[in-house]
Amino acid sequence: MAPSVIEPTVQKSNGDCVIASIAMILGLPYHDVSKVALTVKPAPHEDGITMKEAQSICKKLVGHLFQSINPKGTDIDLDSDTGILWLRMGRDYHAVVLFEGIVYNPADGLIWNLHAYLATKKAHVVRLLRP
């Protein structure tokens, strides 16, 4: 179920954008998500987390997987949806929170219009992980 409110969380390391995003979407403290992430991967804060690892973390926290959606292959509307957006930015991947079409970037704590963020960061949506 999608959250009705998001408490902004800024990532604390170079590779923990997914941890911060999961905390926001689930409404859990960063510390709690971080502890579970360490059971899935040895150094998730620096090495980052894959989509499958993120789903495993979510399952451990709430008992079910997030739905992994290819936005190009479905009828979802990113302008109104909520979840974790997996983005490709050049050779790198980054996760941000999409809350009813608005982007919260855990890397800098800024709130963005989806289309402005994608254009400014030269980012492409890879997947949406929906609670």
Image (tube, grey):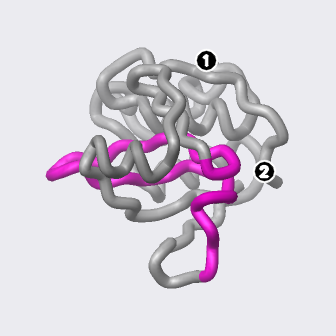
Magenta stretch: give its range. 75-101
Q: Position of residue 23 (x, y in %)?
A: 64, 31
Farthest residue in the left direction? Answer: 91
Residue depicted at x 49% and y 49%: 114
In depth, the one of 76 and 112 nearer the eye is 112
- Give the total number of marks visible in the rendering: 2
Q: Position of residue 42 (x, y in %)?
A: 37, 32
| In the rendered image, the vertical position of residue 83 relative to residue 36, given as above or below | below
Q: Secondary structure at mark 2?
A: loop
The residue carrying pointer 1 sits among few (fewer than 14), some (14 to 19) or many (20 or more) residues within 10 Å by Cα, namely few
Q: Position of residue 37 (x, y in %)?
A: 51, 34
Q: Position of residue 12 (x, y in %)?
A: 42, 15
Q: Quadrant of the C terminus?
A: bottom right
Q: Nearer the viewer, mark 2 or mark 1?
A: 2
In depth, the one of 85 and 26 nearer the eye is 85
Residue at which label 2 appears: 2
| In the rendered image, the vertical position of residue 50 relative to residue 24, given as above or below | below
In depth, the one of 78 and 52 nearer the eye is 78
Amino acid found under the numbered disc labelled 2 = Ala
Question: For this view, does 77 lie left or right of residue 103?
Answer: right
Q: Quadrant of the N terminus?
A: bottom right
Verify whether residue 98 appears in magenta: yes
For the residues labelled 2 and 1, say whether their Cβ atoms are less than 8 Å apart. Answer: no
Separation of marks 2 and 1 at Cα, in angstroms:
21 Å
Q: Secondary structure at mark 1?
A: helix
Choose the circle earlier in sequence order: 2 or 1: 2
| In the rendered image, the vertical position of residue 75 relative to residue 101, given as above or below | below
Residue depicted at x 39% and y 63%: 126
Residue depicted at x 58% and y 62%: 78
Amino acid found under the numbered disc labelled 1 = His
Residue depicted at x 57% and y 82%: 74
Residue at which label 1 appears: 31
